[in-house]
Amino acid sequence: MGAGVELPLNVAKVNVTTPSTADASQKRRKQPANFACPVPGCGSTFTRHFNLKGHLRSHAEEKPYQCKWPGCGKGFARQHDCKRHEQLHLNIRPYPCEGCKKNFARMDALNRHLRSEGGAECRKIQSEITAPLADGAPDGGAALPAAMKPDPDGWTGSGGLMM
């Protein structure tokens, strides 16, 4: 597993994957994860070598992909994260909160808003509009809107892949 992968010289962060992200990855896999991260204590596995390489850049805090938007310059370890970020500059926000009418660029941001303390009232309004989840509601048992799913990134603050 993971043969031929060079260990980054500078491991700045051992844990770059949250437990909820790892769990979500395991659940959606349709093929074996034959590429293991060689960083001691990490434990992340991947189905493609390409994804392991991007993950290793996260350990070293390498960010070779820079946002090209004028004045931004934010860096990313993975090209697809950079492209997703650049789309935010275009202010495309297709995920509306039915409670406060705020629009979000990504569904995980809307879900994080709905799970937050400030989104409690919005959560009530949203649940009146959509059917509640059955068993396994992510907030410990209270019914949440069917459109609301656990954030697979699990990031709640700094260190996440946000704007």
Image: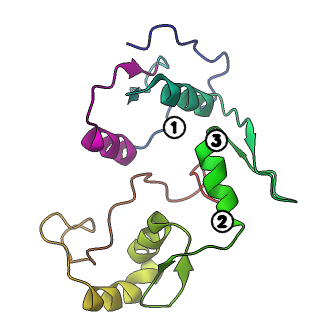
Q: Which residue does the image show at 26% across and 65% down from the upper left?
A: 138
Mark sitting earlier along the chain (1/3): 1
Task: State the separation of the CA atoms marked 3 and 2.
Answer: 15 Å
- Secondary structure at badge 3 equals helix
Q: Amino acid at mark 1?
A: Val
* Mark carried by residue 79: 3
Frontmost residue, 42 versus 84: 84
Q: Secondary structure at mark 1?
A: loop
Q: Is residue 86 left or right of residue 123?
A: right
Quadrant placement of the N terminus: top left
Residue farthest to the right? 71
Q: Which residue is mark 1?
A: 16
- The answer to whether residue 143 is magenta is no
Q: Which residue is mark 2?
A: 88
The number of discs equals: 3
Q: In the rendering, at what x and y percent does residue 118 appear?
A: 47, 82
| Residue pictured at 72% horizontal, 66% vertical | 89
Q: Which amino acid is tagged 2? A: Leu
Residue 77 picture location, percent across and down: 64, 37
- Reading the chain from its start, which is encountered first: label 3 or label 2? 3
In the image, residue 91 above or below residue 138: below
Q: Which residues are magenta?
A: 19-37
In the displayed structure, would residue 133 be above or below residue 23?
Answer: below
Q: Indicate whether residue 20 is drawn in magenta.
A: yes
Residue sitting at x 45%, y 8%:
3
Horizontal placement of 6 versus 35: left or right? right
* Left or right: 144, with 36 as reference point: left
